[in-house]
């Protein structure tokens, strides 16, 4: 965090100065480690084993916050008799289909609700469309009336099933799997528990890299389970904070640049399952479930009304038929493979992205972009994704011939963040407005300018069209006011539309509860409603902390409703009283007859703690006065997830897809439901026991303070380039001696995809670990260099990565892999591919017949 999020890390240091204990768990000793009270090195890719061990420590010693757990989580829910755990199926849950490599979740449901699992799309479709992303806000589509045993003694209640599931995650097993000492592990477990009770809370902080694993979603689920068991969710000083590393990384899913969701986490309609507007709405609101998704009709109507204005009416289902429909996997990595194969994708837009350097399997990225009709690159500089056709590594190997490359590249100069106005949405879901500091030079323009005028020009060319397929474009709302010499669209006008307003009066909406489903209101993103409350740009507020209370509600604006802590009803006990005065945050005021506190209550303001939902009620009415998790189908925190996840109702340890070790817990080696593209140009390093000695070392990656992501904003800056001038690899002194690596010399790193070279930094920051009875070496590399532009250049770490994805959200496993490390510089030209193929052959990946795949090996 100190390295990649230095501004935010100052508050960690302030907390430490006030007595907080800081624990850092990471494969590598970093600037954060140097300032932490405790540093714990662990093997990359084993976080579930580590956290699962703490879950076991809590449950085995009955150290959970019992009152919180019984009242506010689904610990008491009774699970179907049909469920069989990984402990009994050697690493698989019940319902696994070896042909599709997906689960039928019927047996994961709660007792008497087994049929609920049949109401959703099949799991293969959910995996292809990353449908779990909808559950970022959707919650689970379960009946609110589950059978419960609040003594937590029923053998099939969630609490007991969790206890059984994690029973083998002992300190000894954690040490054997993760390479940590038992003493270090127990120190972390005891500290976490001792600081989690009525008087104290513990915060779990993770960065984006935690998601970049084939079990990344389940990493976060394990953290959530632990925080729920200890009563740390919805309370001040607790929770799980996802650090968003650069501008609007949170905003890019809120108002998404993704194929499968629409603004506010509404699902992109599926051509097969959502053939009508009502089917689409029902897939969100889940008739019969508790919670605020009962208003999904309003959220959907307001979005469509914002996009198509007066053309969107009840008579035409508010132009629902104009929405594109997805049919399967249209994700980034599927697209690049389709580019390589040709014939499916003609053109590609890149905006602030540099996949030639910054995306997994750089060779595949460049080969794919070389097989297009046209490519539009909008960036500050002439990045590698604009020049790959003339200076990429594949030019040297002969795989791309510049004179024959068919892709026409259009390089469009972009305005920087200081040269445009608008909002960033990042950590804590906070929108912060930025003013334009100066005019962009020359032809540099903002994204808002580019797409507004591109849309205007396309609409002008189609103005006389009578083709029905052009109506969605021609009837779009596109009348944004512009200003200045270059007719820049007014960003505040766009924010006002996103916020929403009454159609008849233009009055900005104050809350998403004002959204109607009859077309009388519109709003581009329901979770952002309130950011333009009272006609004021709330995101532009900058009231100093010294002039407001500690929650600082007048600095920027956080969705939803400027609420700084989600599910904060859980900060009070079931009777509405603070768990302790020290941790008072939101509570019920009997005299005023409403919820009050330091933050905006995440609950219906006048619903008392004593409220009991009427029998047969649903939606908001069905939320009881002691149901704090208002977006969940049962109002409870989900220790158990009967639906919504592809790879299981609870997290379990699987080895990374590439690992020098066999899974010590199960015969099932890796995540059985992972999304894998089995191709000769996307080979996977074999894991133990299949020739793992060819790629014997574990590697991981992360960022440097001095450079930014793929380097397009930092390698062109002389001072930053001077601070970090060359691509390098960190190795331990022991590995350096074993492989003959000299500090400051060169090393070649090889995987089944490619080989790169890097300067060697021999350092104690990497510690050899003792795993499963033998020593494992880990190496670390940054990923900011590329072979094209910039003051400093170098090989890209992402060339080493393959394409294997988490099945829930289709994010790549790019934070752990295996490799070979050799002294000296890598070969040039065709000899580079020869080196890679020699390793493939020795690993059994290449035979006389061509590529071989280990995916069908036992336990894969």
Image: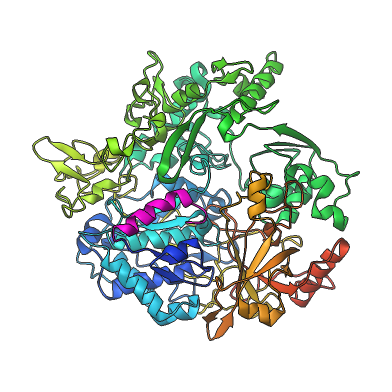
Residue 18 lies in the magenta-colored region? yes
Residue 96 lies left or right of residue 620; in this view the side is right
Residue at the (49%, 66%) spot, across then down: 26
Give the image's coloring scheme: rainbow
At 35% from the left edge and 25% from the top edge, which residue is drawn? 533
Q: Position of residue 459 (x, y in %)?
A: 66, 19
Q: Main secondary structure of the magenta part?
A: helix
Asked whether 126 or 626 is in front, the reply is 626
Quick one: 761 or 699, which is closer to the camera? 761
Question: Can residue 617 be seen at all in this image of the molecule?
Answer: no
Q: Residue furthest right?
A: 403
Query: How many labels, in total?
Result: 0
Residue at position x 66%, y 66% from top? Answer: 729
**Residue nearest the observer in this picture, 716 or 556:** 716
Image quadrant for the C terminus?
bottom right
Q: Is residue 583 toward the left or the right of residue 226 in the image?
A: left
Q: Is residue 164 magenta?
A: no
Q: Position of residue 807 (x, y in %)?
A: 55, 57
In the rendered image, is residue 224 in sight?
Answer: yes
Residue 98, image quadrant: bottom right
Which percent across, then down, holds residue 82?
A: 39, 67
- What residue occupies the far left of the structure in this picture? 591
- Above or below for 394 versus 154: above
Depth check: 515 or 789 in front?
Answer: 789
The part of the chain drawn in magenta is: 1-19
280 up-or-down from 227: above or below:
above
Does residue 212 appear left or right of residue 374 in this picture? left
Residue 38: image x %, image y %?
40, 69
């Amino acid at each position: 965090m100190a390295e990649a999020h230095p501004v935010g890390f100052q508050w960690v240091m302030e907390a430490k100065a006030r007595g907080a204990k800081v624990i850092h768990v990471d494969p590598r000793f970093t600037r954060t480690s140097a300032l932490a009270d405790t540093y714990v090195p662990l093997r990359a890719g084993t976080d579930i084993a580590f956290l699962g061990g703490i879950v076991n420590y809590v449950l085995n010693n009955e150290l959970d916050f019992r009152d919180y757990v019984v009242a506010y989580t689904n610990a008491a829910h009774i699970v179907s008799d049909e469920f069989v755990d990984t402990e009994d199926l050697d690493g698989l849950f019940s319902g696994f289909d070896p042909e599709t490599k997906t689960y039928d979740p019927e047996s994961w449901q709660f007792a008497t609700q087994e049929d609920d699992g049949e109401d959703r799309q099949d799991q293969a479709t959910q995996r292809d469309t990353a449908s779990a992303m909808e559950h970022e806000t959707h919650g689970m589509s379960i009946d609110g009336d589950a059978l419960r045993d609040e003594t937590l003694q029923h053998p099939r209640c969630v609490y007991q099933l969790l206890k059984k599931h994690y029973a083998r995650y002992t300190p000894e097993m954690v040490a054997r799997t993760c390479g940590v000492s038992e003493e270090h592990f127990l120190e972390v477990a005891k500290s976490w528990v001792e600081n989690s009770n009525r008087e104290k809370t513990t915060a779990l902080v993770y960065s984006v890299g935690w998601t970049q694993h084939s079990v990344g979603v389940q990493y976060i689920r394990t953290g959530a389970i632990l925080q729920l068991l200890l009563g740390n969710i919805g309370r001040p000083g607790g929770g799980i904070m996802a650090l968003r590393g650069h501008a609007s990384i949170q905003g890019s899913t809120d108002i998404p640049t993704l194929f499968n969701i629409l603004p506010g986490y509404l699902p992109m309609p599926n051509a097969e399952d959502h053939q009508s507007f009502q089917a689409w709405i029902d897939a969100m609101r889940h008739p019969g479930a508790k919670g605020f998704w009962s208003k999904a009709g309003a959220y959907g109507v307001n979005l469509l009304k914002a996009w198509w204005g007066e053309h969107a009416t009840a008579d035409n289902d508010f132009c629902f038929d104009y929405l594109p429909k997805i049919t399967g996997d249209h994700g980034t990595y599927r697209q690049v493979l389709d580019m390589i194969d040709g014939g499916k994708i003609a053109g590609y837009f890149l905006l602030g992205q540099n996949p030639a350097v910054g995306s997994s399997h750089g060779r595949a990225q460049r080969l794919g972009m070389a097989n297009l009709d046209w490519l539009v690159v909008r960036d500050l500089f002439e990045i590698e994704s604009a020049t790959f056709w003339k200076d990429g590594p594949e030019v040297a190997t002969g795989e791309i011939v510049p004179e024959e490359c068919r892709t026409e590249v259009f390089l469009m100069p972009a305005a920087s963040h200081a040269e445009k106005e608008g909002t960033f949405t990042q950590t804590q879901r906070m929108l912060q407005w930025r003013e334009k500091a100066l005019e962009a030079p020359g032809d540099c323009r903002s994204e808002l300018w580019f797409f507004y005028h591109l849309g205007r020009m396309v609409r002008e060319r189609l103005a006389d069209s009578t083709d029905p397929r052009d109506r969605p474009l021609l009837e779009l709302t596109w009348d944004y006011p512009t200003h200045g010499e270059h007719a820049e669209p007014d960003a505040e006008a766009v924010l006002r539309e996103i916020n929403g307003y009454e159609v008849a009066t233009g009055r900005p909406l104050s809350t998403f509860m004002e959204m109607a489903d009859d077309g009388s209101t519109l709003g581009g993103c329901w979770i952002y409603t309130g950011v333009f409350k009272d006609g004021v740009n709330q995101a532009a507020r900058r009231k100093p902390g010294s002039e407001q209370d500690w929650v600082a509600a007048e600095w920027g604006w956080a969705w939803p409703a400027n609420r700084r802590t989600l599910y904060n009803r859980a900060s009070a006990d079931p009777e509405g009283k603070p768990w302790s005065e020290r941790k008072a945050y939101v509570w019920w005021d009997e005299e005023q007859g409403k919820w009050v506190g330091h933050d905006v209550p995440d609950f219906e303001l006048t619903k008392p703690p004593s409220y009991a939902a009427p029998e047969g009620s649903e939606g908001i009415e069905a939320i009881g006065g002691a149901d704090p998790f208002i977006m969940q189908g049962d109002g409870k925190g989900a220790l158990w997830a009967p639906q919504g996840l592809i790879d299981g109702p609870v997290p379990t340890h699987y080895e990374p897809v590439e690992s020098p070790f066999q899974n010590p817990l199960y015969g099932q080696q890796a995540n059985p439901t992972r999304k894998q593209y089995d191709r000769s140009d996307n080979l996977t390093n074999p894991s133990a026991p299949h020739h793992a000695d060819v790629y014997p070392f574990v590697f991981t990656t992360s960022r440097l303070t001095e450079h930014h992501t793929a380097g397009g904003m930092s390698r062109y800056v002389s001072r930053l380039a001077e601070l970090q001038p060359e691509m390098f690899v960190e190795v331990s002194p022991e590995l350096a001696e074993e492989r003959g690596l000299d500090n400051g010399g060169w090393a070649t790193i090889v995987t089944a995809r490619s080989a790169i070279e890097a300067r060697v930094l021999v350092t104690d920051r990497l510690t050899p670990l003792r795993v499963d009875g033998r020593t494992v070496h880990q190496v670390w590399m940054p990923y900011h260099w590329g072979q094209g532009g910039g003051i400093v250049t170098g090989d890209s770490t992402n060339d080493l990565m393959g394409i294997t994805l988490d099945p829930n959200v289709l994010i790549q496993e790019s934070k752990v892999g295996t490799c070979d490390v050799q002294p000296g510089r890598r070969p040039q030209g065709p000899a580079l591919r020869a080196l890679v193929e020699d390793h493939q052959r020795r690993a059994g990946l290449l035979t006389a017949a061509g590529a071989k795949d280990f995916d069908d090996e036992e336990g894969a």
